[in-house]
Image (cartoon, rainbow, N blue to C red):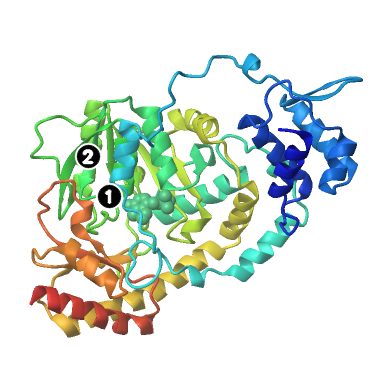
Amino acid sequence: MTSIALSDWLQARLNRQSAVPLYRQLQEALLEAVLEGELPPGRKLPSSRLLAGELGLARNTVIEVYEALSAQGCLETRHGSGTYVADLASERLTPPPAAIAPVAPKLSARGRVLIEDAQVFPRQWGAFMPGVPDVTEFPTRIWARLHNRHWSRANPERLTYAPAGGLKALRVALAEHLRTARGVRCEAEQIVITTGIHQSIDLTARLLTDQGDTVWLEDPCYWGLRHSLHSLGLKLQSVPVDAEGLNWAGLKSPPPRFIVATPSHQYPLGMVMTLPRRQALLEQAKAHGSWIVEDDYDSEFRYGTRPITSLQGLDRDGLVIYVGSFSKTLFPGLRLGYIVAPPQLAESFAKGVAELYREGQLQQQAMLADFISEGYFAAHIRRMRGLYKARREALLAAIGREFGAHLPVTGDNAGLHLVLGLNGADDRAIAREAVQAGIVTRPLSGYYRSPAPPQSGLLLGYACVREDAIAPAFAILSRVLCAALG
Ligand SMILES: Cc1ncc(COP(=O)(O)O)c(C=O)c1O
């Protein structure tokens, strides 16, 4: 390319109306010319004065571009002689591969396990999305005040990498709360702050299992936990649940190293593991050297009876790893949760969380510590419990009006959703129809691992639906149900 041809080629690529600075545009155009071979190695470039004149740019702009490309090794300046295109090929560490085949996006085996089965739903709000609290009721004014308090005199130590385990003030406030509200036996040192139960389970499994180990999981269970454990290369063994919770009586093999359960509120069916079953599980774990991960995701919300104390509170042998979250009590986007590790594991867990994920959000943690210790957390839970109770009753009444006892309701004593039984009808097809009609539900069969789930149903979340919106939303759903059930 002659000097004139080069300036025409560059001119055609400069867009003077664009928000991208001309300096950046010229740099990218010259780089493209070199990489595409329009400017071969050794080719002398016009002087900055000449090129600036031909392109109508300031000379300094061209000088800066030549300097930036020289710093990248794309051009070289020979003093007294001018600027030349560098020989990029001679700088290569390895020769280019003979034929470059187009690269198809190819996931690893464990990547495929995770992605092919993904169930994350694009809509996470509205009737009847299960598992989502009413985030519009979060006391934003109080949060804003705490935000100002902490950001107006931001402590530099809170803006850097976090100390292993999370902010001391939050661990202290949380330990106090968990001891009184959930009967968890713990000191602040046992608490490790995470971004939620997903991360807590990932860390716990990485620290306590090896690839190929077996894990006991309830069937049905929350698919998010199932997928993260499966993608770590663990073998999942499904354990049925009955009215008393996890029931391993029919299994041939002894308990494995790792057991995950939701004893205080089975997810998604809603039963509570009875005291004899809890004791038996702890005995089994002790006899076989198993760890039990207790997922206590939403036990703060019980309607009628008082919250049930945790399994961890019964454990005298340091076998239970208790995991909890602020996703249901405050809002899921906060991404804060916690692990209560047995004392002998606490230090390793604190180091593990820092090594694997790097921690942060110390300012949020400081705000949350104040939110708990100044009584706002307990008050918010109390208030939401009242609201959710009324919404649950509105939904039960709507179901009763439309279907009487024809469709059974289970799991309605606690949490943020209930299960509407469908007497064996195709719950996946009905859930798809409901989404078309504007109502989000989750089919119960999606939570089972077995290809032939023993029951079909819909999870109906009522927590994030205003009380007066429940009956109209259920009327839409009942039209879908009547059409499907005949
Ligand atoms: C049983 C169960 N465990 C854990 C979670 C996720 O918790 P987090 O948001 O803290 O990761 C959910 C979310 O729906 C859940 O249902």
| SS for callout 2 | helix
The N terminus - image quarter: top right
Name which quarter of the figure residue 375 lies in.
bottom right
Q: Is residue 296 visible?
A: no
Per the image, the residue denoted by label 1 is 263
User: In the picture provided, is 440 more to the left or to the right than 20?
Assistant: left
Mark 2 residue crowding within 10 angstroms, few (<14) / some (14–19) / many (20+) = many
Marks 2/1: CA distance?
A: 10 Å
**Residue in the image at 22% along x and 49% along y:** 275
Name the disc covering residue 28, or none. none
Q: Is residue 307 above or below residue 163?
A: below
Name the disc covering residue 281, or none. 2
Please name the amino acid that badge 2 sits on.
Leu
**Residue in the image at 35% along x and 74% along y:** 389
User: In the picture provided, is 7 more to the left or to the right than 446?
Assistant: right
> In the image, residue 33 lies at what x, y percent?
66, 35
User: In the picture provided, is 100 more to the left or to the right than 120?
Assistant: right
Please name the amino acid that badge 1 sits on.
Pro
- Circle 2/circle 1 CB separation < 8 Å: yes
- Residue 311 vs residue 390, the one in the foreground: 390
Name which quarter of the figure residue 133 lies in.
bottom left
Q: Residue furthest right?
A: 80
- Residue 129 vs residue 294, the one in the foreground: 129
